[in-house]
Image: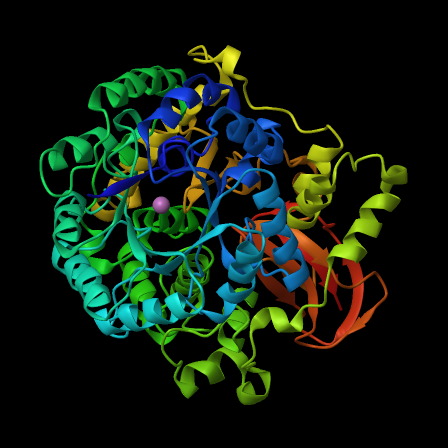
Amino acid sequence: MVQLHEQILRDAHQSMLATRMRTEDMLPIADKLDEVGYFSLEVWGGATFDVCIRYLNEDPWVRLNKLKEAIPNTPLQMLERAMNAVAYWNFPDDVVTKFCQMSKKNGCDVFRIFDALNDLRNMKTPMKAVKEAGGHVQACMSYTISPVHTVDYFVENFIKLEKMGADSLCIKDMAGMISPSRVYDIVRGCKDAGIKLEIDLHSHCTSGMTGMAYQRAAEAGIDILDTDISAISGGTAALPTESVVAAFKDTEWDTGYDLKLLIEIRKYFLEVWDKYRHLHRFNALKVDPSVTVHQIPGGMLSNLIFQLEEQGAHDKYRAILDETARVREELGYPPLVTPSSQVVGVQAVMNVLHGRYKVVTKETKDYCRGMYGKPPAPIKPEIMKKVLGPKWKDEVIDCRPSDLIKPMWDEKKKELQEIDGGAYIKKEEDIMTYILFPQVGLKFLKGLAKPEFTSKQLPLPIDHDLMRGMVKQSFTEHKAIWLETESPENRSGGPAQIPTEFEVEVDGEPFEVKVNPTGGFLVAGASSAAVQEKPKDVEGGIKSNMQGTILSVKVKKGDKVKKGDAVATIEAMKMEQEIKSETDGEVKDIFIKEGDSVASGDLIMQIL
Ligand code: CO
């Protein structure tokens, strides 16, 4: 018998509907889902927390409570990013421990825990916390292809995870690129090595090989397979639940699930799919076997195309693809998943635009220092020297990254208590929301977040602002083809026909950007006035070398600075980079402030 892990309420809509499914569209079908008898039902974690507070004006903790109440029999599962919890950076042990305890208390039973680099040290704290809280730990290995990611590598690490106290194991093929023979060898290898724990395969249909991979996984003795109810499946999402159930019917892998019940559930989600039509994206429905050639996940490819657009380097697509593979190798073959996919992707773009490692992002430096964990393979000294300078050895840490972070809970709790007399703490979980997402979380807690849409408004009328998403998608698609096949001179259609608002995705997490008519890019909601007031050029002008948001201004007018001093930091697509002074001198004028959006080439300050 094979069991299924149903992902319709998390991964399916994160893959196909920008994670936007609202709780009110989940609850009416909850009792039916609970009847199926799944191994577990994934409902929380991943990008859902962020999207709830950022775009839906929904309290993620309340969602979890409501689903638990509506689904009392099936274990509820969440995706937990090791020391990142449900955010994108490392937290100290006290926060991660408390996060796991709270999630358990609020209704989560099974915790799927993964680390982007498969650094098992990063998984220890959440695993321990979940065990102590009485939860089920499903420990993952992030799947990727490289000379170090051999079958033995996966089997050996799964043995370690079993010893660390995992309750079940998961091959997390987040890019959907595992092949039938590969999955067979890993599962068989685990079983032959005497691993007793149940093994789960998580994959996506991206490569087009997934159906065959599931069959071979079953033949090798897989215990659990991840699927999505067919209404929101295939393409960049997972295989359809009903198809897998039908395929295994009357075989030794029969799930025993009621197909009629599943078809009833499918009918419900077909309506949901239709209601959310403004989020349909044609590309997401297709398979993309190119991943089998360059091993770059589909989501990351569209991100790379976007990065090229924003840096005004349309012609460099091929070069960047090759450079991405090269940078990934040089950085020790990290699996390309949040946040390592951004580290590698942005560094590759920088290398092609500015010369190899001439501009190094803060994230690449942190990665090489070991701040994300230990890279799967060692990084060569010559690369370390390029990234961190001649004294690179002094900068590298060999401890677990979170060992360097001081406990945070008490301090942050006090901080939030002091904002408007503690008016925004209605429950302990609100403090966690604030710690995980200081800006977006606080805005949400203050009641200032606005939902993009409510369930009652769906489907959105054709003239609704958000309907542009569909136009944008086909535009991006054509643009991607054009990038490869045409020179800019042959480009048809004038700027007037080009949409100015885009939604881009990084690993299924949506970002909104606006393109201003002069060619610069603005993050949605940012004021364009600030940008227009800026002079184009001045003597001693320091300019931004990338599009992004000013994260911090490190100097003030009148400050003396030295050549190479960091004067500001800029953030784009979650990547942070320092802007440095090009000369010794005094800060004469500052043209930006924290939170401003700048385009590549925009004036930042004047230093003479
Ligand atoms: Co997934």
In the picture shown, does residue 549 fall above or below 182?
Answer: above
Residue 67 at x, y percent in the picture: 51, 28
In the picture shown, does residue 509 fall above or below 456?
Answer: below
473 relative position to 243: left or right: right
| Residue 9 placement: quadrant | top left
In the picture shown, does residue 115 fall above or below 586?
Answer: above
Q: How is the image coloured?
A: rainbow
Nearer the observer, 212 or 548: 212
576 relative position to 260: left or right: right
In the picture shown, does residue 584 fall above or below 598?
Answer: below
Residue 523 at x, y percent in the picture: 57, 40
What residue appears at the point 39 percent right and 27 percent down from the top-left corner?
34
Nearer the observer, 15 or 113: 113
What residue appears at the point 15 percent right and 58 percent down from the top-left corner?
184
Ligand 1 position by quadrant: top left
Q: Quadrant of the C terminus?
A: bottom right
444 relative position to 19: left or right: right
Residue 5 at x, y percent in the picture: 33, 40
59 relative position to 263: left or right: right
Nearer the observer, 140 or 302: 140
Nearer the observer, 31 or 535: 31
Residue at the right extreme of this rendering: 421
